[in-house]
Image (spheres, grey):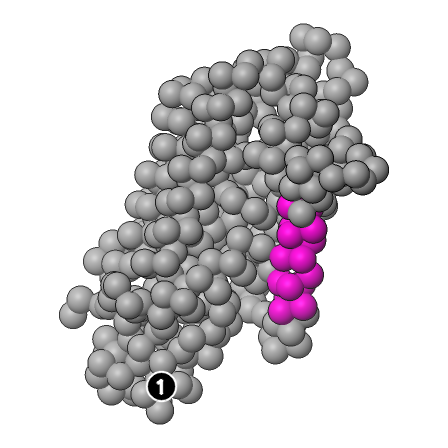
Amino acid sequence: MTKIKYSPELKILKLLLAIYIVMAFVLAGLNFGYVEHAPEKTAAAINWAWHFYENWIKTGFIAAGGFLTLRITGGAQKNRLRRKNLLGFFIAALVVHIAGPYIFNNPELYYFAMPLPWTNQPLQLLQPESPFYRAFVTEHGTGGIKATLFFYLLVSLVVFGGTLIRGRRWQCSTLCLFNGFASEVFAPAFPLVGQSRKAGPRLIKVFQLLRWLFLAIALFFTAYWLIILAGAPIISQVTLFSRLEIYKYLAFELLATMFMWVVFTGRGYCYYCPLGTVTGLLGKAAGQRIITDIQECIDCGKCNRACPMAIDINRPAQDRKAVTDLNCVGCGHCIDACPTGTLAYTTRFSCLRKVR
């Protein structure tokens, strides 16, 4: 990793990250584990606190953390692509966490802003037997269901359509409000405890197995809800499957991701995120690659140190070969770090390079 000087700005950024993690653990635990059994007023207070955290506090942290990260890493001019990433996440947060809930009268709109990865709540909204449908229709009515599903379809079109044009960068380094935003906004602060580190070859192989496992699990849940919606003659266990998805999300997405923030890296979940896998494959269809032959590589290794996904860019650059790794999230850190400007992120429809 690129060495970061321990400055007052970095101390503040680490403090913000710590606060964000602690609040997530506490409020998510209360919201998903206790609220069903709490008195009505207590449950309402927990729901309000969870929504306020997910919407307003997250947006505020994106703004503050993004500003601090640019300061720590050398300013906007030195980090042209990183600046674009941070601006994209801030705009996405304004849409999903601020404007969207107001327009659609739904403070939980963020559940529908990331297709596929951890729940199939849009499909559950079409199933009257699901506990999520019953809770949702009681609060928002059938009109709220239609509006929310429209928002989900719009987001899916934006995510998958944009990926076919801009590659995996479009979702993972511009729009993702689950792990992508944190990995960019808090980048210099990872890990929260100990020295910065990257995944080694053995760990990357483990992540590769997890990538296909979690994609298979996500597709399994999707297939289950589609079969139920089709009215196929199978034993319906909608409450059980709904809870299993929530438990999977809490254990292997939310808690695991934040644990990696504390002791490992900000991009850990990006290795096995189901949506990241799908957008990675779509990125290949879009011709996504890091080209390395604009200028001469001087073998400084700065690109490898800057890459948060531990991709070897330096060796292909010496041979003037393109990098097409499925793990590439298109963050552009290697491009910002390259002193000769020989790198560029390209698809069939776009090209992002360093302005010298």
Residue at image position (69%, 42%) is: 227
Q: Taking the image as drawn, is residue 120 in sight?
A: yes
- Count of numbered circles on the image: 1
Q: Left or right: where does residue 299 sit relative to residue 201?
A: left
Q: Which quadrant of the structure image shows residue 260?
A: bottom right
Circle 1 residues within 10 Å: few <14, some 14–19, many ≥20: some
In this rendered view, identify the residue nearer to me: 96 or 122: 122
- Give the labeled residue for mark 1: 321
Q: Left or right: where does residue 22 sit relative to residue 350?
A: right
Q: What residue occupies the far bottom of the structure in this picture?
A: 319
Q: Residue 214 at what x, y percent from top left?
A: 66, 56
Q: Which quadrant of the structure image shows residue 314?
A: bottom left
Q: Secondary structure at mark 1?
A: loop
Locate the C terminus and report the quarter of the image it occupies.
bottom left
204 relative to 239, above or below: below
Would you say residue 272 sits in the magenta stretch?
Answer: no
Query: In terms of secondary structure, what is the magenta stretch mainly?
Result: helix
Q: Residue 62 at what x, y percent from top left?
A: 41, 40
Residue at image position (75%, 20%) is: 36
124 relative to 135, above or below: below
Q: What residue occupies the far right of the structure in this picture?
A: 235
117 relative to 169, above or below: above
Q: Residue 253 at what x, y percent from top left?
A: 64, 48
In this rendered view, identify the residue nearer to me: 282 or 257: 282
Q: Taking the image as drawn, is residue 193 in sight?
A: no
Q: Which quadrant of the structure image shows residue 173?
A: bottom left
141 relative to 176, above or below: above
Q: Left or right: where does residue 248 sit relative to residue 324?
A: right
Q: Residue 80 at what x, y percent from top left?
A: 25, 58
Magenta segment boundaries in residue numbering: 207-222
In this rendered view, identify the residue nearer to me: 338 or 156: 156
- Kind of residue at disc 1: Lys
